Image (spheres, grey):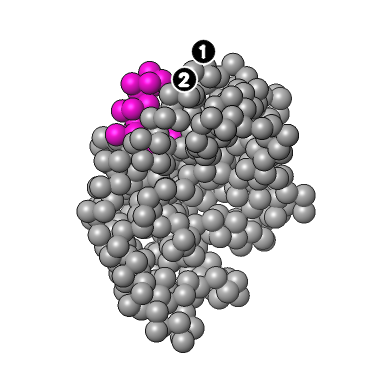
């Protein structure tokens, strides 16, 4: 298998011979990792359950965790799931890598499509599955929403969407998601939406693909799956708690596959995760922090505040040169957009001349870094 280096490895190589300006405090705005303390009640739940380390965890997940995740889906999206329609997972990265391998294993000449730019694990899964890849380019011209080409989609076995989108921050409406559900049924491909940023919204709650499935009458979620995680919503990426939910016929076979992977979450982590999934107050508090950061960004960079995520997808004249200049002169790290995307069949990289800025610091550090970025833009 020939995997591309991860974006952060490429960034390190880009900057390795550049000395940053030590007159400024170092600021790293590259990774989507909240720089805030995990709420105390989650930490306490972890400590109280540490004695459970003596037990093996079940692949299916503990009842309290599964119940908490189902309750989250019901309260947040108005969707009631059965136990057979949801599987707790060890975060979502492992699912995004191993689920396509599971699903595409028996397909002859498998084809997978996903949004471009993308979370690189999608590409890794495609490579590991020996699948042909179709890129759904997200550009300013299509408002960073995937265009529908049914002649291509009809050849797909699987399509991965990522809305709210990392890195472009775009979102799809309930009706737009519903159109994708219809396409999945019409052309019989599995449609998976990566919804890890669904809870980081700045105004109105963002719809789920599960809601859209019900909206268009697909009540059993045929061909429809979503994943979600507490990493962003609870500032707890180290808990590695996520889920995959939707079509129970697919999930039944996938659960059998998972028993061989050995990726069950340790019981203390599950107990802490159950506490996190069950609480919304701490999520509301986190959203307020990100809203304030976006207001600062609007004030300094004159951006339009996105509907979701904690990123800025900022156009610059030359993303690689800008990234080097920003680090050298202002000691700020950002991620060049072309590292998050690939050239399509026409030789176009939709991430070119963009940078991704992660607003995951407190207000003071955010303001300082954004002021330096503004100076560098001049």
The residue positioned 59% from the left and 29% from the top of the image is: 21
Seen as rendered, the residue at the extreme top is 378
The residue shown at (26%, 53%) is: 282
Q: Which residue is mark 2?
A: 374
Residue under label 1, please give it: 378
- The location of residue 67, given as percent across then percent down, is 30, 69
Q: Position of residue 173 (x, y in %)?
A: 34, 35
Front residue of 86 and 178: 86
| Residue 79 on the magenta span | no
Residue situated in front as seen by the camera: 151 or 224: 224
Q: Is residue 123 above or below residue 91?
A: above
Q: Residues within 10 Å of mark 2 (few under 14, many from 20)?
A: some
Label 2 SS: helix
Q: Nearer the viewer, residue 110 or 327?
A: 327
> Which residue, as the protein is rendered here, is positioned at the far right?
2
181 versus 58 height, above or below: above
Magenta span of residues = 292-311
The secondary structure type at the circle numbered 1 is loop
Q: Position of residue 164 (x, y in %)?
A: 41, 39
Question: Residue visible at 33% across and 21% down?
Answer: 299
């Amino acid at each position: 298998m020939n995997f591309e280096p991860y974006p952060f490895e490429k960034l390190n190589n880009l900057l390795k011979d550049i000395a940053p300006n030590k007159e400024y405090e170092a600021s790293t705005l590259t990774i989507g990792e909240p720089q805030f303390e995990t709420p105390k009640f989650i930490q306490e739940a972890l400590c109280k359950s540490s004695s459970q380390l003596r037990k093996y965890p079940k692949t299916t997940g503990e009842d309290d965790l599964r119940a908490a995740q189902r309750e989250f889906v019901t309260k947040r999206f108005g969707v009631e799931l059965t136990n057979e329609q949801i599987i707790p997972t060890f975060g979502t990265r492992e699912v995004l890598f191993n689920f396509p391998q599971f699903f595409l294993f028996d397909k002859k000449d498998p084809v997978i499509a996903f949004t471009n730019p993308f979370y690189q694990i999608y590409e890794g899964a495609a490579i590991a599955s020996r699948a042909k890849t179709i890129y759904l380019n997200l550009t300013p011209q299509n408002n960073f929403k995937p265009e529908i080409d049914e002649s291509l989609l009809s050849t797909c076995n699987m399509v991965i969407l990522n809305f709210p989108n990392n890195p472009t921050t775009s979102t799809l409406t309930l009706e737009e998601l519903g159109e994708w559900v219809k396409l999945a049924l019409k052309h019989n491909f599995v449609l998976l939406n990566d919804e890890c940023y669904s809870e980081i919204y700045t105004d109105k709650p963002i719809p789920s693909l599960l809601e859209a499935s019900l909206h268009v009458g697909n009540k059993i979620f045929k061909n429809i799956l979503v994943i979600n995680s507490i990493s962003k919503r609870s500032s707890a990426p180290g808990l590695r708690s996520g889920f995959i939910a939707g079509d129970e016929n697919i999930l039944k076979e996938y659960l059998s596959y998972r028993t061989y992977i050995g990726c069950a979450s340790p019981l203390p982590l599950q107990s802490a995760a159950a506490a996190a999934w069950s609480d919304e107050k701490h999520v509301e508090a986190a959203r307020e922090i990100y809203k304030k950061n976006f207001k600062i960004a609007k004030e300094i960079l004159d951006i339009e505040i996105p509907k979701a995520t904690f990123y800025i997808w900022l156009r610059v004249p030359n993303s690689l040169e800008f990234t080097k200049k920003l680090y050298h002169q202002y000691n700020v790290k950002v991620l060049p957009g072309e590292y998050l995307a690939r050239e399509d069949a026409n030789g176009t990289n939709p991430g070119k001349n963009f940078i991704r800025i992660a607003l995951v610091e407190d207000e003071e550090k955010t303001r300082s870094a954004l002021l330096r970025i503004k100076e560098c833009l001049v």
